[in-house]
Amino acid sequence: MDGDESRKRLEEMLREPLARARAHLGTERGEHAFAEVVDLIFDSVYRIVLRRLKTRHAALEVTGTTLLNAQIRLDRYDPARPFLPWVHVIARNAACDFLRRENHSRAYKHRLVMEEFDPTVHDVPAAPAATDLEIDFKHVLATLSSPLRRVAHLRITEDRTAEDVALIMGKSVSWVYRRLEELREALAVLR
């Protein structure tokens, strides 16, 4: 069986569980139907992500994120079009986002290491002194629990949506909103 035939056959196999998943969005029945979809497409999505990322661990992480994003955005999927290309676009975008974050993180860590061991760094003018507000902000962050600091980092520093934070942390969106409310209360002392 060639590639086109196998894709057509897979699309046929996906049609019924996808219809059930879309019909029962947000319910346990819809989740079970989407689990059937995941069973059918996992390998395909994983291969696309692995080709871009080259490491199994990262590919598994991004594949999981991709499938969760596909489930969350299932209401945006047009059933008149093939499902696999739609999911593959989400997978490619997720892999590219992962690489961007990794490259940014790697460059930042490299810069820190180079500054630490570079004897000429002392010739560079010092950064301006932190303001009282910045010092207070850092103090408040230091008093927060680890999950709350992670939410703050993702939401404030990386400018992620609450839905993205939920995906990254493996929590529900309502859990993230509760943490954001805690964060607002903690930061209220700075006003």
Image (cartoon, rainbow, N blue to C red):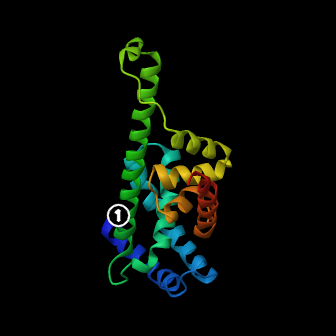
Query: Closer to the camera, 119 or 28?
Result: 119
Q: Is residue 190 left or right of residue 9?
A: right
CA neighbours of label 1 inside 10 A, class few (<14), some (14 to 19), many (20+): some
User: Quadrant of the image for the C terminus?
Assistant: bottom right
Q: Residue furthest top?
A: 119
Query: Closer to the camera, 39 or 137?
Result: 137
Residue 152 position within the rendered picture, expressed as x and y whole percent measured from the top left: 55, 52
Position of residue 125 relative to residue 28, above or below, is: above
Instruction: Judge whether residue 71 can be spotted in this image.
Output: yes
Q: How many marks?
A: 1
Q: Secondary structure at mark 1?
A: helix
Q: Is residue 69 left or right of residue 170?
A: left
Q: Residue at x 61, y 83 (%)?
A: 29
Query: Closer to the camera, 89 or 5?
Result: 89
User: Quadrant of the image for the N terminus?
Assistant: bottom left
Q: Residue at x 33, y 72 (%)?
A: 5
Q: Residue at x 52, y 41 (%)?
A: 134
Residue 120 position within the rendered picture, expressed as x and y whole percent measured from the top left: 37, 13
Residue 30 position within the rendered picture, expressed as x and y whole percent measured from the top left: 57, 81
Residue 76 position within the rendered picture, expressed as x and y whole percent measured from the top left: 40, 78
Q: Is residue 185 left or right of residue 25?
A: right
Q: Name the residue tied to disc 1.
A: 89
Q: Quadrant of residue 87?
A: bottom left
Q: For the residue marked with disc 1, what is the amino acid?
A: Val
